[in-house]
Image (spheres, grey):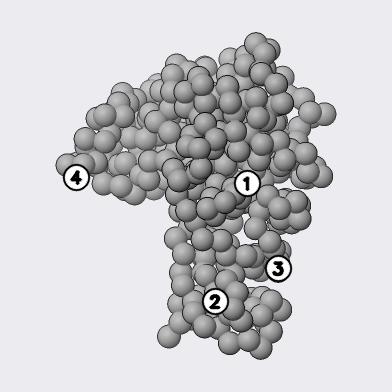
Amino acid sequence: MSDLDTLPSEQRDAMHAALREVIGTAAIDATTPISGGATSARLFRIDAGGKNYLLRIEGAPSPLRNPYQYVSLRIAAEDGIAPRLYYVDETSRVAVMDFIQRQPLGRYPGGLPALAKALGELLARLQATPAFPAFVRYPDIVARLWAHVCCTGLFAPGVLDQYNEHLARIRASYVWDEASSVSSHNDPLPANILFDGTRLWMIDWESAYRTDPLVDLAIVGDSLARTPELESILHRAWLGRPSDEALRARLRLVRALTRLYYAGVLFSASATAPRDRPDTSLAAPTLAELAEASSVGRLKVGTSAAKHALGKMFLASFLSDAATPGFDLSV
């Protein structure tokens, strides 16, 4: 039995329709499930007719689902930022695109400085595409996700008060500029930046819509340009010149929002696990403590406990503007 046969019947029908459209009568030589990271999508590598394709079948939509995912994906693929797109059915939420074999970002020629430059240039290319549709203002979606966290009962009453107050201050200082919003990926974590051995691609466009141009810059900076030198390279490659103080001041506000967003994602995941009582502490482990707990097995990668600890670390960075733990920790 093929792995494709494990799909629900409705998804199997949609998958067969997609593959008939793309490969016709060519025999499928191999079908390989692909790990999708944090996404709920089912991913398969399909080898047929001497070519390699990626079949993507979305999971159950979340309450915050972006309805413009496929419009944004098409634009990005047409501009060579996403892999070539062969087929999309927005109703069944199935897509077929080129499969690109991932190489570690650490092997990028020239190391982190060259990678930071390439990422800045990639963001500039993305933001110069025909504008993606607008979906929601970024501060609003952050606030909605954080409000959900506050309602889960994950934390005891009063524990989150100072973070709610800090969010209110940021939203009061941040001025939304609709005219300056641009095509954005909105989730350019290392898992969604693909290096094929020669160039970079962006994948997983579930969250892509038009928004503040600093959202992607903040996330990439926290991910892969984590020193002042690398950040300077990233900003110059993206902007075409060094950033000024006005831009850096606005970036601090946007970066706080992106950090709270990912704290919300992590806490939303940890809130699904049973708990004896609400958490009364937001004390966050250091990177060294997190690594040590993982190495000795006290904190297992991928568990709710690991996500909860990492969420506290992002929340601490939201409040202090200190460096985040990064987005490349597979917890």
Residue 217 location, quadrant? top right
Label 3 vs label 1, nearer the camera: 3
Circle on res. 297: 4
Look at mark 1 in the image and give the residue it sits on.
Answer: 207
Q: Residue at x 30, y 26 (%)?
A: 286
Q: CA distance from mark 2 to mark 1?
A: 28 Å
Label 4 vs label 2, nearer the camera: 2
Q: Is residue 2 left or right of residue 53?
A: left
Amino acid residing under circle 1? Ser
Q: Residue at x 76, y 55 (%)?
A: 78
In this view, the residue farthest toward the left is 296
Q: Is residue 261 visible?
A: no
Look at mark 3 in the image and give the residue it sits on.
Answer: 86
Give the quarter of the figure containing the N terminus. bottom left
Amino acid residing under circle 2? Asp
Amino acid residing under circle 4? Gly
Q: Earlier in the sequence, mark 4 or mark 3?
A: 3
Q: Earlier in the sequence, mark 3 or mark 2?
A: 2
Q: CA distance from mark 3 to mark 1?
A: 20 Å
Q: Residue at x 52, y 65 (%)?
A: 43
User: Viewer-proximal residue, 156 or 313?
Assistant: 313
Amino acid residing under circle 3? Tyr
Q: Earlier in the sequence, mark 4 or mark 2?
A: 2
Estimate the x, y position of residue 203 in percent, counting from the top left: 59, 52
Look at mark 2 in the image and give the residue it sits on.
Answer: 47
- Helix, strand or loop at label 2? It is strand
The reply to whether discs 3 and 1 touch (Cβ–Cβ < 8 Å) is: no
- Helix, strand or loop at label 4? It is loop
- Helix, strand or loop at label 1? It is loop
User: Viewer-proximal residue, 36 or 67?
Assistant: 36
